[in-house]
Every structure is written in C-alpha cells, then in structure tokens.
Amino acid sequence: MKLIIAIIQPHRLDAVREHLTGIDIAGLTVTEVRGYGRQKGHTEIYRGAEYQIAFLPKIKLEIAVPDGRVDDVVQAITAGSRTGKIGDGKIFVLELEQALRVRTGETGDNAL
Amino acid sequence: MINSGDTAWIISATALVLLMTLPALALFYGGLVQAKNILSVLVQCFAVACVASVLWFACGYSLAFSGSGPWIGDLNAALLANVTRSAPHPGTAIPESVYVMFEMAFAIITPALIIGAYVERIKFEAVLLISALWLLIVYVPVAHWVWGGGWLAARGVMDFAGGIVVHVTAGVSALVIAAMLGARHEFPHGIRPPHAPWMVMVGASLLWVGWFGFNAGSALSAGGDAGMALLATHLAAATATLVWMAIEWIKFGKPSLVGAVTGTIAGLACITPASGYVGPLAAVLLGVTASAVCFTAVLLVKRVVQVDDALDVLGVHGVGGAIGSLLLPFLTLLGGGVTLARPVMAQFAVQAIAVMVVGAWSAVATFAITKLAAWTVGLRVDLETETQGLDFAAHGETGYHVNR
C-alpha cells in the first residue's frame, strides 16, 4: 500500500476530486494548510503599502491506495491540479505499512 | 421656542453620529488589524466612547460650550446642572439636552479616531488615560475656540462640522502618539495585512451613513443648510471613492476594496468643514482633491516619515480635514455656496491660522499627555503580549473560535 500526499492550489480541489472519482477512488482526506515553495508567497497592496504573504493557502490531500493504483492516482491528481503556473504544488508517495477499517476490523488492501 | 422639526432631526442625527463610533469606526479599524487584535480595537472604541460621555457630563460640555472667554468656557454647566427641560440652546430651536447630547457624540468619536494610530501595541490603561486627558486638554478647548464662542469664532473661522475641531486635532495627535509609542515590532516590512477587508467596508459604509448626521446635523436645524450639507457630503464621498480607486488601478494595476473605502473616508473628512457652506459642484471637486492628496499623504507618512500611524489617522482624517478647511473659502464661490462675511483671501487667512494653531496645540498638548501616561501607567505592552496579540494577552478573549 502507498500513501499519496498532494499539496495543491485550493481552487483546483473540485477538479482533482472529479478526476479521482472518475477512476473510482473511494476516499480521500483534505486539510487546509499554508506553506510556500519556490513560489515564495506573494505580495498584497493595502493603501499603497506592500505586504509579504509568506505562507499561501494550499490544500493537502491524503489518499491511501493499493500499490497497483499509484500511477493512476498520481496522474488524476496531476490532471486536476495542473495549471502550468508556478504554485501548482507537489505530490509525494510514501510506503504505507498498515491500514485498518475501524467498523469491520478489515486490514490491508481490504480496508482501503 | 423649541421647534419640533429641528428637535426631531437633531435627535436622529445624534443617533447617527453615535453609530459612527459604535460600531462603524470600531469595525472600520477592527478589520484593518490582525485577527489576534480585533477585540482589543473594539473594546478600545467602546471604552473611549464611555469615558468621553462621562467626562462630557462632568465638565467637558461646560468648558466647551458654557461661557464666552477666548480660551476656555466656564464651569457653570458642570455636571449638566443647569440643563432644563424647556430652555432651548441659545441660537437654536432645540432643547439644551439635545444639544448637549449631539455635541457629546462628537466628543466621543474624536478621541476614538486616534485609536487608529496606536492599535496592536498600546496598553489599555494608556488608552483610557490618554483619551480622558486628551478630551479635556485638546478637544474641549478647541471646540470652545471654534464653536463655543472662543477666539477663533470671534475671528470668523468657518468649520461647519469639525474639519478642524475633529479631524485636524485627531490627525495631528495621532501622529504624535504613534511617534512616541514607537512602531509595531514588525514595522515596516513584516506587518501583517488587514485581517478582514470586508469588515473595513461594513465600517466605512456605516460611517458614510452616520456622516449624514454628523454634517447635516451640524446645521442644528432641519432646513436648507442641513439639506445642502447632506447632498454635499454624499457627493464628496462618492467622488473620492472613485478617484482613490482610479489612482490604485493606474498605480498598482488593480482597484482594491480597502483602497476604495479609504477614499470614501478621505472624501467625508474633507467635506466635513465645508459641508453646510458649499454647493454640489464644490463637493465633487473636494472629493477629487481629498483622494489625490490623502493618497499621497498616507504614502508620505508610511514611507518617508516612517511613523507607524497604523491605520493612517493623519493621512486620511487629519489631512482630509485640513484641506477641506483651507479650500472652503474658495469653494463657496461656486454655485450653491454661502456668502462669505469677508473677502475670500481674508477668510482663507483665518482658516489657515486656525488649522496651524489647532495643529500646533494638538501636537504640544498630546506630547505632554503622552509623556505623562508614559511616566504613570506606561505606554507599550511587552513584546510577548504584542506577539501573542492583545485580544488574549490583554483582554483574555479570542476573536475567532473557528476550527480550533
């Protein structure tokens, strides 16, 4: 099993969800987060004064999938989140040791 | 004789002017600060309003509006002892009680305006002490000089609703306090942006409506002067909003909400001294001037003078009030204006003297008051309190319990 963590632009969340639903991904967890990468935040101007916004709002997705689905999911997230502009985000793939469905006690791929 | 129409209008106007402080100014300023300081701004506005009210009752009203000495009134109306039900205020057809209350609403908003200079870092004790002393030492004498039969009134100064009495006093004093208090620790590059621009807009909108009471109420009657002041006030606000928006659009590429409503307030401050004296065209011209000059003034204070007048009290209110006061003699010559009692340049000279002397008195007296506060209760919170935010550190409350 793999855990896929993606940091995306908040306004691309719906598109990403549609792409994931399209390949029958059954569940994902979403967190509102803040951060910066090479984009290094942005500036906003209020009454002529520039304010550095170092941490931009982003969305963090967490999806646990069987090994065989990793490529599909990464592709779906990329398709949904990519605008081609700086700040589109990143996708991380991690080894996932165990999963357990709390209601039934199922484990491993059956719990996903 | 008390006139019921006049009385009804001034009671309504009084409510509108109180609305300008509670909640309009509180929201206007509250939206501009960081989320961790929102409640401190609201409680500062609320407390200053109450301190000013009690002092107005105790002796403020009397020293401003009772007696006709050149510098200060007398104590004959202290504790409002001589306010009767039946007697009208001299020169008006409204009861003395209504006049006291209408003027009280002005005494409330003027020290509250200064809050914009010292937000996010001042001790609450200092807010209370400075506001109380400032009301009695700056506002009350100046109100007497201009409106209470003092030396500027004798010279024929024209200040319809408080360009000098309210906005110049508050603006200049704001800069002095901000300089003495020192900048917020992140100033100028690490300052956080306004936490709720929508709240700034709500505050500005309520201020706009409240200003109808402020300016049209200053006619102290329900008639032609009130009507023309109402019209001029609205036109100046609308024009100044568009001009500030245009300046930002050209200079920064985007017209911002915070910029637009800042223009509104600059226009309103600018038309205040002129509102009952000029016609519609003059109001539009003042609106244009207000945003052009105040936009520059805000940048000057922040970038050149580098004083952390956090919410631009001098740049928007002080400068707006001053230019309206200085330009009004010329603008009365346009359609709908009043006839001046003296040649236009002579009137301009009176206006200039008033702005300069009032500005100087505000600066000197505020310096002394702030020194006194520094020696007694202290001015600034410690760095940890400032970093944590005044809401929790100083008031034990949190503005937003969302997802926490």
Image (tube, coloured by chain):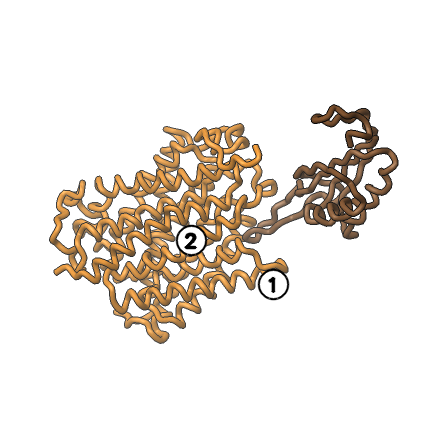
- Residue B304 as seen in the image, left or right of residue B136: right
Chain that the image shows in brown: A
Q: Nearer the viewer, residue B166 or B175?
A: B166
Amino acid type, mark 2: His
Amino acid type, mark 1: Ile
Which residue, given by chain and number where applicable, does mark 2 sit on? B317
Whether residue A109 is situated above or below residue B80 in the rendered picture: above
Neighbour class for label 2 at 10 Å: few (<14), some, many (≥20)?
A: many
Q: Mark 1 belongs to which subunit?
A: B
Chain for mark 2? B
Distance Cα–Cα, label 2 vs label 1: 24 Å
Residue B373: image location, x then y, percent: 37, 33
Whether B205 is drawn above or below B78: the answer is below
Q: Residue at x 73, y 45 (%)?
A: A17
Q: Which chain is orange?
A: B
Residue at image point 51% right, 37% down = B400
Q: Position of residue B297 (x, y in %)?
A: 50, 55
Q: Label 1 crowding class (10 Å Cα cut-off): few <14, some 14-19, many 20+?
A: few
Residue extending farthest to the bottom is B335
Task: Report if residue B346 is visible in the image.
Answer: no
Residue at point 30%, 42% (across, down): B52
Residue lying at the far front in this picture: please name it: A104
Mark nearer the N terminus (2 vs 1)? 1
Q: In which quadrant will I find the C terminus of chain A?
A: top right
Q: Which element is circle 1 on?
A: helix
Q: Which residue is mark 1?
A: B250
Counting every numbered tag in the picture gives 2
Check the image and report above or below for B18 versus B351.
above
Depth check, front residue: B375 or A2: A2
Q: Which residue is pictured at 46% across the width and 31% down the height? A: B397
User: In terms of depth relative to the viewer, which is nearer, A77 or B137?
Assistant: A77
When asked about the image quadrant of residue A100, the answer is top right
